[in-house]
Amino acid sequence: MLDGVALKDQLSGAQTRWDRRRERTHGRLLHAAEHLFRTHGFDSTTVEEIAAAADVAKGTFFNYFSSKESLLGELLYLRIRPLLEIPPPAGAATDRIWALLDGVRKELSPYTHLWQRMAMYVLANPLPELLPEGHVSLADALSRLVREGQGEGAFSPALDADAAGALIATYFFRLSVLECLGTSQSAILWEDRMQVALEILYRGLCVATRDPLCPDSASPGR
């Protein structure tokens, strides 16, 4: 008969094996979906085809993802996750913000057709649950950089860092959607439009620069 410690160790080992099996299945689904999306397109790929390519049952797919969009959201997120979790190189706060935005854009550029599809889904579903709880979003990463800038004296301490991060992220995604869609507005360089938006945010809309909410010392990075 197993004693309490041995039983605990056995259960822990079984749980570890189960977790590894789940991770492998999760990875196979992501890999299969990425290949099919690239080859046949997002809309033409079915859940059944993804499951078959990953060698699992269709029902197993829904043990990991609630929909194709949920899978796509995680697939794209994994491309930019390192950029969101690892701070940009040392430098001025405005330079670090620019480095993050430019890095995310470049990392997603090979996936333009998938990014376009994801953007359309998010626009149609303002509060989609695409990623597990606890993941760092672009707005979170930007808010962190804004707080660092406040600590360095680059930004006003009165600034709401969370709101600033969300504003930058929202405009970033807007420009990215226009670029993906190839509208007439996207003819204007993405970098120029993003720089203008950051300039407005950094310098503010106030005329009186002595207002603590309108610092005049910061300038957009690059």
Image (cartoon, rainbow, N blue to C red):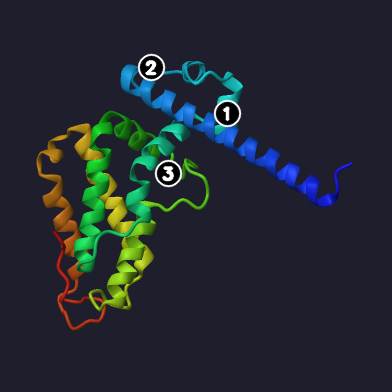
Q: Could you tell me which residue is drawn at 16 percent across and 79 percent down?
A: 209
Which of marks 2 and 1 precedes in the sequence?
A: 2
Q: Which residue is mark 2?
A: 44
Mark identifier at residue 155: none
As helix, strand or loop, the secondary structure at mark 1 comes to: helix
Residue placed most toward the observer, 219 or 85: 85
Label 1 to label 3: alpha-carbon separation: 22 Å
Q: Quadrant of the N terminus?
A: top right
Q: Name the amino acid, label 2.
A: Ser
As helix, strand or loop, the secondary structure at mark 3 comes to: loop
In the image: residue 8, left or right of residue 43? right
Q: Could you tell me which residue is drawn at 14 percent across and 68 percent down?
A: 219
- In the rendered image, residue 168, in percent from the top left (x then y), is placed at 28, 57
| Residue 129 higher or lower than 170, as above or below | above
Residue placed most toward the observer, 31 or 8: 8
Q: Name the amino acid, label 3.
A: Pro
Q: Could you tell me which residue is drawn at 39 percent across and 39 percent down?
A: 122
Label 2 to label 3: alpha-carbon separation: 24 Å
Instruction: Indicate which label's residue lies in the foreground, 1 or 3.
Output: 1
- Say if residue 85 shows up in the picture: yes
Mark identifier at residue 62: 1
In the image: residue 116, left or right of residue 215? right
Q: Quadrant of the C terminus?
A: bottom left
- Say if residue 42 shows up in the picture: no
Q: Which residue is mark 3?
A: 126
